[in-house]
Image (spheres, grey):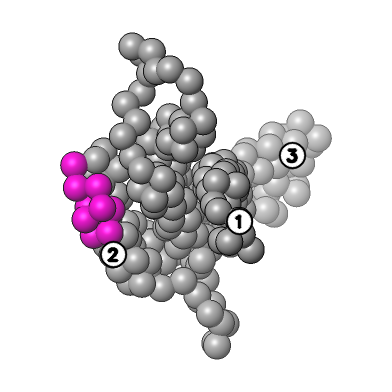
Amino acid sequence: MAIAPPPGTLVLDATHIVATLEKLHERVSERFPKSGLAKLCGKLVVTGRATAAQADALARPYLALRALGALVAIVALVFQIVLVSHIDWSALRRNADVLSMSQALDATVNLLILAFGGLWFMLTLEQRLKRRLILRALYELRSYAHIVDMHQLTKDPTVVLGGGGIATSSSPDRQMSEFELSRYLDYCSEMLALIAKLAALYAARTQDETIIEAVNDLEDLTSNLGRKIWQKIMIISQLDERRAPAGRAR
């Protein structure tokens, strides 16, 4: 169910998020022009634009479905009124017995259940359709988060800083300098943060607990993955300080 935020409430601006993604893509492409991370960031920009458009579209009501739901409600109400009006209640009272009355009540209750079941189905159809689309989009963003994590998985700061042993034939190719590795990890961290912000666009104007829970889970995932990256950045910083001359120590 889409809701409008209270007046004066600060909300995420999808335009700014996409602009930040585009700027990040430029930075990654300039620093690592032929890297897989640059290509991934480019795809994330495209997904970010689609997410912004979809989140805005899903925040608007589906007027056709709502009109159809209102029509179904009116038809169901008219049907019940017509049904009740055609029942000869005086004849039922004159010829009433327990069995016939129970059968009549059972049939009436079943019709009411079917009518209200169809009405509930139509009234919740819009919410269920939107929920399905959003959960599918969140699954895609979750995949992006795991792919970003895969890109930084083999980036070992101790090896880059000369703390590793002899490389084997199966060792990853590590040709980055200390500065380049630090920037690479920082770019990964920024991408994870922006993935979480894209997910938050879906939860900004809804009261659907399923969607809010899914967005919170994705934010927890990106936060945990980002924490691992910042641990590597801190290792680089600490090892760099240890290797610095005494005069540079702070």
Residue under numbered circle 2 = 23
Q: Quadrant of residue 100?
A: top right
Residue 70: image location, x then y, percent: 44, 64
**In front: mark 1 or mark 2?**
1
- Seen from the viewer's position, the closer of residues 189 and 15 is 189
Q: Residue at the spot x=48%, y=20% of the render?
A: 165
Of label 1 and label 3, which has the lower sequence position?
3
Q: Judging from the image, what secondary structure is the residue with disc 1 in?
A: helix
Residue under numbered circle 1 = 246
- Seen from the viewer's position, the closer of residues 59 and 53 is 53
Residue under numbered circle 3 = 101
Pick out the residue farthest to the right. 98
Q: Residue at the spot x=28%, y=64% of the render?
A: 23
Q: Identify which amino acid the numbered label 1 is placed on.
A: Ala
Number of other residues with Cα within 10 Å of mark 3, as a class: few under 14, some 14 to 19, many 20 or more: some
What span is in magenta?
Answer: 25-34
In which quadrant will I find the C terminus? bottom right
Of label 1 and label 2, which has the lower sequence position?
2
